[in-house]
Image (cartoon, rainbow, N blue to C red):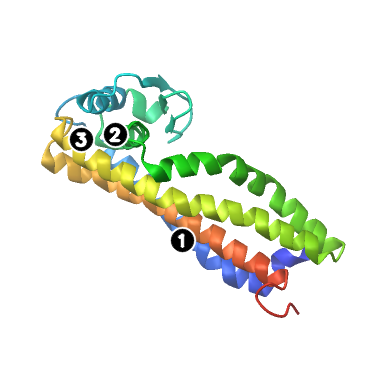
Amino acid sequence: MFGWMFDPIYLLMLLPAMILAGIATMITKSTFNKYSRVPASSHLTGAAAAQQLLHSNGIIDVRIEHTRGFLSDHYDPTSKTLRLSDSVYSSQSLSAIGVACHEAGHALQHAQNYLPLHLRSALVPAAQLGSNGSYIIFIMGMIFSAPALMKLGVILFALVVLFSIVTLPVEWNASARAKRFMTSSGIVTASEQQSAAAVLNAAFLTYVASAFTSIMTLLYYMLRAGMLGDDD
């Protein structure tokens, strides 16, 4: 049933993506840990930095909450809530400030109707459906030799790929806003901004790796479904 997972073509196509994902995760954790030991001269916590960035841009209706988990930070546009993790919320490090300001960047995107953010939010239900259902439907199609089911699985997984691609400009833009406003809002100095920005640049690699992995997985599914040529 799961013999396809040991398909040499599968390993050949997905191995580079797996390696890239591993490297990206390692770089992100290493960079975050490095600058988590460097306090900002402003002595602002991640939560305070995010609030200062928001207020300096006229945004006063976003709540900032503490959430559990390592780097589980995120902005929820449905409730206008910015949730910061244990290592970010109360830390005064440059890593914490960089991550917090990045999430505040998403709130700025929301307030200014940044189109890719709205597109990504609209794609969430479809991406969840594709993520949860594509694999099962694709495998069922293989088991029962049903090309129609396999192609349906491909279509569903394509929604996941679309979501991961749309995520790239959203995350890059949020980081660009954070880099710009964390300095102009007096949260960090110009030299400190470079260190905080290094954390954001490293984190962006994980999104690139995720998108690449999704694309390669989709191409493999298409190949197995006979949509890229003959399937031997």
> Which percent across, then down, holds residue 51?
28, 23
Residue 28 seen by the camera: no
User: Which comes before the other along the chain, label 3 or label 2?
Assistant: 2
Residue located beneath label 1 in the image: 20
Give me the residue at 26% from left, 48% from top. Answer: 198
Mark positioned earlier in the residue sequence (1 or 2)? 1
Mark 3 secondary-structure assignment: helix
Pick the quarter of the image with the N terminus: bottom right
The residue under the point 40% across, 43% down is 115
- Can you tell which of label 1 and label 2 is closer to the viewer? 2
> Looking at the image, which residue is at 59% across and 52% down?
159
Q: Earlier in the sequence, mark 1 or mark 3?
A: 1
Q: Is residue 156 left or right of residue 123?
A: right
Residue 100 coordinates in the image, percent (x, y):
32, 32
Query: Which residue, given by chain and number where applicable, does mark 2 sit on?
Result: 101
Q: Amino acid at mark 1?
A: Leu
Q: CA distance from mark 1 to mark 2?
A: 26 Å
Q: Nearer the viewer, mark 1 or mark 3?
A: 3
Amino acid type for the residue under numbered disc 3: Met
CA separation, marks 1 and 3?
30 Å
Q: Secondary structure at mark 1?
A: helix
Q: Is residue 219 visible?
A: yes
Residue 230 horizontal/vertical position (percent): 72, 80
